[in-house]
Image: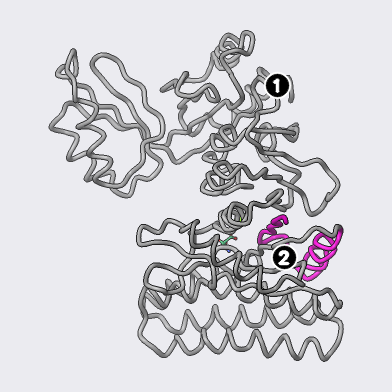
Amino acid sequence: MKVMKFGGTSVGKPERMHDVATLITRDNEEKIVVLSALSGTTNSLVEIGAAMANGDRAAAKQVIDKLDAHYQTFISNLLATEEAQTKCRAIIAEHFEFLNIILKISFNEALNKDILAQGELMSTKMFSCYLEEKGINHMLLPALDFMTIDSYEEPQIGSIKVKLSQLLNQNKDKKIFITQGYISRNARGEVDNLKRGGSDYSASLIGAAINASVCEIWTDIDGMHNNDPRIVKKTVAIEQLSFDEAAELAYFGAKILHPASIWPAQHYKIPVKLLNTMQPDAKGTLITEEAGSVGVKAVAAKDGITAIKIKSSRMLLAYGFLRKVFEVFEKYRTSIDMITTSEVAVSLTIDNSTHLDEIIRELEPFGTVELDKDQAIVSIVGNEIGKTEHILSKLFESIADIPVRMVSYGGSPHNVSLLVPASYKTQTLQILNKGIFGLD
Ligand code: ASP
Ligand code: MG
């Protein structure tokens, strides 16, 4: 049995949804198809929640009406017969009735989660209507019946496994199951979610739970590329990556795979394939335990990084200094990404500066604290990078004119990271494309 996940753009237009139906019926393997909400819908639902939280019901109502109109047009183009359209409109109307009812009741966080869940509930139901019209035998599997998270918001893989296998056993005659990505039920039994972009995570968890032959993530690019196609002219798709390499890249918002979705697949040894709905026969990228080959595979960058330097002569020959520094970050639940140290100073980076002021205040007693905002991490990712011939000389020669703020090498055999001012991000990615991959 396999998992096929389609993201928002893959279901975002009626004709794309038609393509998804073709893709899931190309082979006879049993499958669970995981869908995101139509592209743009979750953003609108976030807007509705935000307007409600501000007490601005008129603004919320406006977004709801606009969304409703969008779904009406979508249904007209998705389904051919009057009969199928009428049935589908009635199903979708229930969701808009719900959204209109919440306008009248008092708003809270639990209700917000209910609002956010409407996107995936609607996309899967509409897709099911289309499959039904086409006479494609399938079953809608409500994610809220099996996808659960605990009180730390961590997925309960054991219980997901049990519930899902029960549901599948009760429906042995079915070969195609459709379910919602993103949404889940929390420890209080309320509707919740796996955070923005979480449909990949759902797919990977489902893959792990059913011990899938493969977890296919279908998007609109042919896999992971060696560099950012929006920034450099020429990029190539990466054929094979290990989970460790994929994890390094996922952090950089190589947007095609959500970072959290890596561990379930890695832990349960489920191969992941990144595929392109527009070019279904292209190879895409295979992610498995093995890296496939030695060498550098990609460069990636992330901006919005803040570097913090703590300088203190008390650090000299002292022990326990770093622990005290790290505890401050732990207290504010802020994760540290890059770190470099000298005998008297430590520099580290964070990408979430929500608690920056408090963090700095608590670091100040340890020494002089300096900040560099608007930085970017540029990372070179591959397998056994250190064993790649002349990699460091190639790297440093290429970046001779870039004012590098930090370098991190040796943290893992899969990564060399540079911290540069964000204004140099584009240039750095471009020169590395030439210097390391020989591409323009
Ligand atoms: N619909 C959700 C979002 O936009 C989940 C997803 O698409 O992965 O974040
Ligand atoms: Mg997505």
Q: Which color scheme does this rendered protein use? A: one colour
Q: Nearer the viewer, residue 367 or 247?
A: 247
Q: Which residue is mark 2?
A: 11
Instruction: Note whether 422 is above or below 208 in the view shown.
Output: above
Residue type indicated by callout 1? Phe
Quarter of the render that holds ligand 1: bottom right
Q: Please check the rendered image and state whether residue 17 is part of the magenta-colored stretch, yes or no.
A: yes
The residue drawn where x is 64% and y is 29% is 298
Ligand 1 within 8 Å of disc 2? The answer is no
Q: CA distance from mark 1 to mark 2?
A: 34 Å
The kind of secondary structure element at disc 1 is helix
Task: Give left or right: position of 358 versus 189.
Answer: left
Q: Which residue is mark 1?
A: 437
Q: Position of residue 153 (x, y in %)?
A: 40, 59
Task: Give left or right: position of 231 versus 108.
Answer: right
Q: Position of residue 101 (x, y in %)?
A: 48, 90
Looking at the rendering, the stretch of residues picked out in magenta corresponds to 1-26
The residue drawn where x is 47% and y is 19% is 409
Residue type indicated by callout 2? Val
The kind of secondary structure element at disc 2 is loop
